[in-house]
Amino acid sequence: MLTSYRAKGQVYHGCLWVLKRLAAIVGAGQTRFGDHPDLSVKELFAEAYREALGSVDKGLDAKKIKALYVGTLGVGGYQIGNVSAALADHVGLRDVAAFRVENACASSSFALLSAVQGILSSQYDVVLVAGVEKMRDMSSDRAKYWLGVSGDTEYERLAGMTFAGHYAIMATRYMHEHSVDKKYLSMIAVKNHYNGSLNPKAQFQKAISLEEALKAPSLAYPLNLYDACPTSDGASVLIVVKAELAKKFTDTPVYVTGFGAGSDTLALHDREDLTGLRATRMAADQAYQLARIKSGDIDFAEVHDCFTIAEIMAYEDLGFAKRGKGWLLADDGSTKLSGRIPVNPSGGLKAKGHPIGATGAAQTYEIFHQLRGTADNPSRQVKGAEMGLSHNVGGSGATATVFIYQR
Amino acid sequence: MLTSYRAKGQVYHGCLWVLKRLAAIVGAGQTRFGDHPDLSVKELFAEAYREALGSVDKGLDAKKIKALYVGTLGVGGYQIGNVSAALADHVGLRDVAAFRVENACASSSFALLSAVQGILSSQYDVVLVAGVEKMRDMSSDRAKYWLGVSGDTEYERLAGMTFAGHYAIMATRYMHEHSVDKKYLSMIAVKNHYNGSLNPKAQFQKAISLEEALKAPSLAYPLNLYDACPTSDGASVLIVVKAELAKKFTDTPVYVTGFGAGSDTLALHDREDLTGLRATRMAADQAYQLARIKSGDIDFAEVHDCFTIAEIMAYEDLGFAKRGKGWLLADDGSTKLSGRIPVNPSGGLKAKGHPIGATGAAQTYEIFHQLRGTADNPSRQVKGAEMGLSHNVGGSGATATVFIYQR
């Protein structure tokens, strides 16, 4: 891992290195992801909010919070609307600008992006970013509909395409172009299930064998049940402050030093290639440029593994591997907890769970603790990490965000 | 109207007056609001987008657009999701950060707020703000549900409260506290219908008499059909740029010089009073302070008149009249087109229509043309206006925005 030469004021990539602090995370909370039949959206949010407030080392008077950015997909799915105002109201935040940001599966990372921009615009010093979703009490038809509308409707959803179908098309194309066996997809599932088994907030805390992963019931060839993330309930909350104020709240803030957002067509047939996501590459380019780093500088990452193939494509789109070579990282252990660049130490969407709107902020929650060395379970602490990356995808790749974080 | 002493560099309120340009509007488009059974959400957006692009005096290469902020309530109401990416895709915008912002009836004004913050954060030079909604092809039960969830659910909606019911409660309390007759509410309807009769983009282009307004069928006492805005289809688009770049696109930009966002409880029974909206007062205070002006400096305004009582409360909450005295402005003609401070020259939500997500950006569309002196119909041009205000409310007052605009 890269270490001290990146310290502020050192020469790096031939230039004087000055850490570019765009905003700071000083607190974070997350419910366990999974099945919460007894908790409403408001209660899930409140639980994560209380943890986030309590995690601010030097304390935070909630009255200082001036904006709330909530990422959630499911309005109507849980009977309440005006969601951001409703959640602010529920926890007694009276003086906030309340925004709901919805970008399908990337809702709360776009909420974080708006929040960072709100801070950079000098409008707010302290803001809350939240993600929340309740999917487990929907009928599967309804869940399929809510996910389905995040892809193309006219040519895909109404023709019967499912989300597993989208990624199955990308997987078959990838396997064909690069002569890759399906077992490399399953290796991602095995790794992420192992990581999830160590994470007390993961939906699946159960390691699986490669054999089990390969034998699971098929969803859409080549993807089977263990290639797919589950439906989940959950919430995540971040406390984001102006970088210059961070030390008032904690001696160990985590800084956002880069971010980017990309887009692409919704329909797969309009894309130039199916073996990667243009939106991710666009977001990563912006983020690396803003942080003035290269992909090789990243110590670990939380990436969007809604299906196992998505994680392999992310390796390539984020620059961790060359095009067509991402599957090798699944094979050689580079992205395991103990590897060169651990990916999805939390268990990822695959094992931690994927409550749509909550996922982006939960990736940041994981990175916050990993960079501070405060992972709940020491056995899953990434050692000596200084620079993390989160990557969140909306729908079947029509939008994506990438964030860079540094201690 | 206040004029030249507000010119840049002049002494004003005892201080040196420097126009604070936060962002600039250089183009705007709007579909006619009303019934569009033949146009999809994508097509409505595209129509407003084409008008907006075409309205940029010196031209704009669409490739310069780096972000799209879409305000809309109705995901699911029109079968498509990932809406911001979908709309970008539909008009061929490939390199944008696409955000959907949803704050009930204030969705596109919160989208504008995020966009201005995006510009102020130095992330974007040229962005698009859009509002879009398609309500007319919903069943009335479904429309009632989508509106209903924007108010409180646990204590109000599920107990049978409707949106007309919310505002009827505010109206009866207002009438009781200030001994006001219902006819003053109807005067708002008469004024706004007259303004709508001159606006080729209004849903109702038909003047009504006070007698007609008073005799309309009751909705929820004291509000009747002519006290309520209609359900509408429509779209609106703004082109917003960094203030310093505005003159590259037009010699007559409209600058955003102040903005604010406020919040309140969703449930009416939790509020301190029912005769005004705290969220509006909070947003207005912020906006006036940021623009360094007072309410008396505003030449004209577009305010949120979902029901006639809402416009009277807005007069007071925005400081155009003292508490309890707003109804007098309805009576003395101050807010007519030819009055001291014209309000809702467009016809307002009442007559122009209220396609939920499209309303906020459409208010800005009206102000853009009024401040440039390019109202489509010269008979409704507000004369010599230099400073405009827009006011947009989410739900029954849980959120609100206020923007200040100057030539």
Image (cartoon, coloured by chain):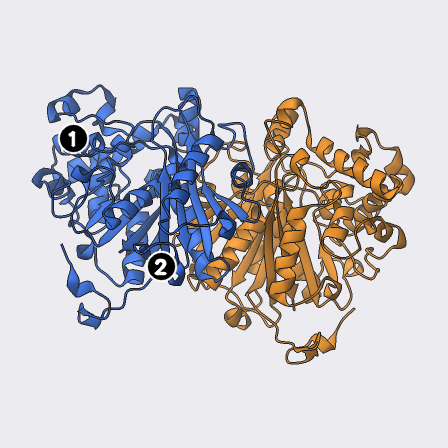
Chain colours: A orange, B blue
Which residue sits furthest front?
A: B58
Spatial separation of the CA atoms under disc 1 and disc 2: 39 Å
Q: Position of residue B219 (x, y in %)?
A: 26, 23
Front residue of this view, candidates B122 and B398: B122
Nearer the observer: mark 1 or 2; the answer is 2
Mark 1 or mark 2: whose residue is earlier in sequence? 1
Residue A338 against residue A134 in the figure, above or below: below
Q: Which residue is mark 2?
A: B247
Q: Is residue B350 left or right of residue B149?
A: left
Density class for disc 1 (Cα within 10 Å; few <14, some 14-19, many ≥20) is many
Residue A328 at what x, y percent from top left? 87, 51
User: Can the viewer see residue A89?
Assistant: no
Q: Which chain is home to disc 1?
A: B
**Residue B155's x, y, as percent?**
40, 33
Task: Give residue B161's position: percent from left, percent from top.
Answer: 35, 28
Residue located beneath label 1 in the image:
B190
Callout 1: SS: helix
Q: Is residue B48 left or right of residue B184?
A: right
Identify the residue at horizontal 47%, vertical 27% (top origin).
B40
Which residue occupies 12% across, 36% down? B180
Amino acid under disc 1:
Val
